[in-house]
Image (tube, rainbow, N blue to C red):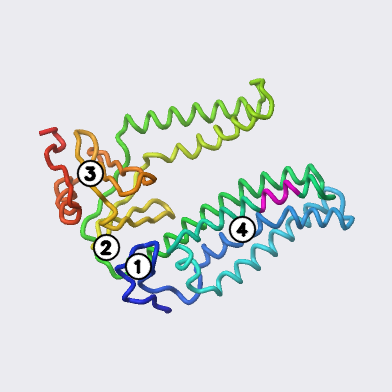
Amino acid sequence: MGPFSRSERGADLGSAPGGAVAERVDTTYALAGGLYVTALVTPAALALAVQSGISGAAALYVAFLVVVTVTTIGTAFAVRRLGGLPERLGRSRRQWAFVVVAGVTAAGYLVAGEVSAFPTEMAVIAVFAVAYIGGLFGILLAAMSRTRYIDAILADEPIECEWEAGWPRLWRIGVVGTSLAMIAVGFLTAFLDLVPGGIAVTVFGWIAYVSGFVLLNLGESWTYRARPSGLERTRSVIRRLDRWNRITSVEQTETTLTIRRRGWWRPPIHCAWTDLEDPEAIREHLDRYVADVDGARGVDGQ
């Protein structure tokens, strides 16, 4: 095991790591890295195959399978040897380099389709594959890097209080309704082309369609854990930690427990009261660390 500096354990997340990291990257992260690189380079590899004279659906399919298999496995083996890589990326904004590289690569394919012998049809497919698939894997790798960094710095920290909560039911109904409407509009404009207006409407349809699926996740349940160093939030492969000095206030209403964080770009955290099994204990632990806790109104509004 390769330890991070103990003196850095109490530092802010964006500036220093703590805890310990494994000598080898775990298989899940390495495989995600392999699929990410595969999404970026496969269109170029297939274009080179076409330029070299390979033709026919069967031959191209075999070439596709070979490129995907070799690139994914080769990259995964290489990433496995880079012990501490996820934690070091997750400690800063460098984690978002995965998304930036995917965007730059997609733009490169678009330019190649305009100024070189790169087939235009393949360039369009490449831009879509890299921007969408590569971008999704980039976001996933960024989240996984942050999660593994937090795993490292919280390895020895006790859990003082734990609860699971999402948004109130009426809020979720509104989110789901809005999401489905956006998906429907996007499908009608981007896929069925039922709304006239040219490329601008088509682009709007794609944005609405993708945004609708993203919005569906808004307000879903997270697992919260109060720890000495901050408030941990976990859902699926995503793990986040807000230091207590980043949380400015805790407010209570008849329907929600709202945790506000420093910085306009950080939205408040909302927990439905009906999801909290022991709200008084939760408020007590938050009161220990957060200076501004509104205790004037409880679940019953008193």
* Residue type at tag 4: Leu
Say which residue label 2 marks: 229
Q: SS at mark 4?
A: helix
Give the distance between the C-alpha atoms of the residues marked 1 and 3, in whole angstroms: 27 Å
Give the distance between the C-alpha atoms of the residues marked 2 and 3, in whole angstroms: 22 Å
Vertical relation: 101 (above or below) 190: below
Left or right placement of residue 169 versus residue 177 in this view? left
Tell me if residue 28 is in the magenta stretch.
Answer: no
As drawn, the label of residue 35 is 4
Whichever of labels 1 and 2 marks the residue nearer the N terminus, that label is: 1
Say which residue label 3 marks: 276
Q: Which residues are magenta?
A: 105-111
Mark 4 touches mark 3? (CB < 8 Å): no
Q: Residue at x 56, y 75 (%)?
A: 81
Q: SS at mark 2?
A: loop
Give the distance between the C-alpha atoms of the residues marked 4 and 3, in whole angstroms: 39 Å
Give the distance between the C-alpha atoms of the residues marked 4 and 2, in whole angstroms: 34 Å
Q: Main secondary structure of the magenta part?
A: helix
x and y percent of residue 293 in the render? 17, 46
Whichever of labels 1 and 3 marks the residue nearer the N terminus, that label is: 1
Whichever of labels 4 and 3 marks the residue nearer the N terminus, that label is: 4
Local packing at callout 1 (Cα closer than 10 Å; few below 14, some 14-19, many 20+) is many
* Residue type at tag 2: Ser
Say which residue label 1 marks: 153
Whichever of labels 2 and 3 marks the residue nearer the N terminus, that label is: 2
